[in-house]
């Protein structure tokens, strides 16, 4: 028997973990298992069928694929954890049989939190990368891949540091029946993290909308000027496509994670002590990050399909020379000078 912070007996387990056997709680676990499978299948389908259609710069593409990896990890760990919890609740014969060993709770909980934070921070860093691409549009197409690699490393290190802050003094000795449960020793710090992440989500969404509008204005100006080389025009077109995709992804992430943060924060404030089985089911149902893992590939597939036609049409318009009026005459003179030079 493991050394827990409280005395683990049938009376304690019946009071705290009776919800593990309730049909509502088991239904939520089944819902998460199905959602995890859908997420992993849709992510795999996107990589097989649509990843080659992302004609993005290396720096944004590596961050983009890293977020897909974080979503896949989140879905895989959640599916494994919920399948384990569901089977355990069905075969258990004693109230305390559903209590997870500390090592198992830690090995499932930490990857869930880490992958969720990676999803968050990779989105923020993608918006930062697109901002750099928009500001350095004249030279970014030929820029080094170091920016993307550095940002990806940051997207890994920051979640690791955040997890260390949340759990560095936690002994993981409180009995838990779910990998998604929060240790009592870390609840206050987790609340602070939720508030910070929600603020960052809102700022990221506002910035991604502004970035998309900015790129739209720049490419309209570019159409009326002929001194921009073709690669610069192409880069501007890709900036619009990628910033629009980030806009939709940031919107989905803000709505889903804001719902999750507000729900968890409210439940931690208003629900103290033993909870009913239905409330425990509602608590797990409010874990909404798996929804983003399922929605993100759909957004990217729709964006890839729509952007192909838009990209071809816009690129064709960018390379078409004017043949009438003063601009047409200037283009004709320029061609003659190059021919006879």
Image (tube, helix red, strand yellow):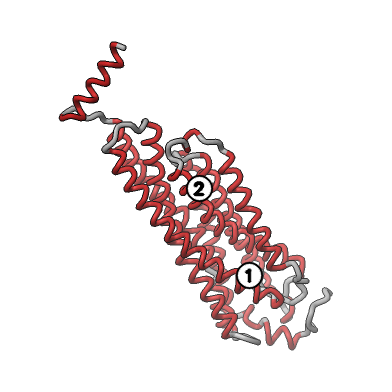
Residue at horizontal 39%, vertical 35%?
232
**Of 200 and 10, which appears nearest the observer?**
200
Which image quarter holds the N terminus? bottom right
Residue that protrudes farthest toward the top in the picture: 340
Between marks 1 and 2, how big is the CA–CA gap? 32 Å
Question: Which quadrant of the view contains residue 158?
Answer: bottom right
Q: Tell me the element at label 2.
A: helix
Residue at horizontal 71%, vertical 68%?
167
Disc 1, disc 2: CB below 8 Å?
Answer: no
Residue ID for mark 1: 180
Rendered location of residue 94, percent (x, y): 73, 80
Rendered location of residue 143, percent (x, y): 52, 36
Mark 1: few, some, or many residues within 10 Å (few <14, many ≥20)? some
Residue that protrudes farthest toward the left in the picture: 325
In this rendering, does residue 24 appear at all? no
Residue ID for mark 2: 129
**Of 258 and 95, which appears nearest the observer?**
258
In this rendering, does residue 30 appear at all? yes
- Which of discs 1 and 2 lies nearer the camera? The answer is 2
Which image quarter holds the C terminus? top left
Residue at horizontal 30%, vertical 34%?
318
**Of 77 and 67, which appears nearest the observer?**
67
Relative to 230, is 96 above or below? below
Mark 2: few, some, or many residues within 10 Å (few <14, many ≥20)? some
Relative to 164, is 319 above or below? above
Rendered location of residue 58, percent (x, y): 52, 39
Which numbered marker is on residue 80?
Answer: none
Which tag, 1 or 2, sits closer to the chain's start? Answer: 2
Relative to 314, is 123 above or below? below
Rendered location of residue 228, percent (x, y): 35, 33
Q: Tell me the element at label 1.
A: loop
Relative to 241, is 191 above or below? below
């Amino acid at each position: 028997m493991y050394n827990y912070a409280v005395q683990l007996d049938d009376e304690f387990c019946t009071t705290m973990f009776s919800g593990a056997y309730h049909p509502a709680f088991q239904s939520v676990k089944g819902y998460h298992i199905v959602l995890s499978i859908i997420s992993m299948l849709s992510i795999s389908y996107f990589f097989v069928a649509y990843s080659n259609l992302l004609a993005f710069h290396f720096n944004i593409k590596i961050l983009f694929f890293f977020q897909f990896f974080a979503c896949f990890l989140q879905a895989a760990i959640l599916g494994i954890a919920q399948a384990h919890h569901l089977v355990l609740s069905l075969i258990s014969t004693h109230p305390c049989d559903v209590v997870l060993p500390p090592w198992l709770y830690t090995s499932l909980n930490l990857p869930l939190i880490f992958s969720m934070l990676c999803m968050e921070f990779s989105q923020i860093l993608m918006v930062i990368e697109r901002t750099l691409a928009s500001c350095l549009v004249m030279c970014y197409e030929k820029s080094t891949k170091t920016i993307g690699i550095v940002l990806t490393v940051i997207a890994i290190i920051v979640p690791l540091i955040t997890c260390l802050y949340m759990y560095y003094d936690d002994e993981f000795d409180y009995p838990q029946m779910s990998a998604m449960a929060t240790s009592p020793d870390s609840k206050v710090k987790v609340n602070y993290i939720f508030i910070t992440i929600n603020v960052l989500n809102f700022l990221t969404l506002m910035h991604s909308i502004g970035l998309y509008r900015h790129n739209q204005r720049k490419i309209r100006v570019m159409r009326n000027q002929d001194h921009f080389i073709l690669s610069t025009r192409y880069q501007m077109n890709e900036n619009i496509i990628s910033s629009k995709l980030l806009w939709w992804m940031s919107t989905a992430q803000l709505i889903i994670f804001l719902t999750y943060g507000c729900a968890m924060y409210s439940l931690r404030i208003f629900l103290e002590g033993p909870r009913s089985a239905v409330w425990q089911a509602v608590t797990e149902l409010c874990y909404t990050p798996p929804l983003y893992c399922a929605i993100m590939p759909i957004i990217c597939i729709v964006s890839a399909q729509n952007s192909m036609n838009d990209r071809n049409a816009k690129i064709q318009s960018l390379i078409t020379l004017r043949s009438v009026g003063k601009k047409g005459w200037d283009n004709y003179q320029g061609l003659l000078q190059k021919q006879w030079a």
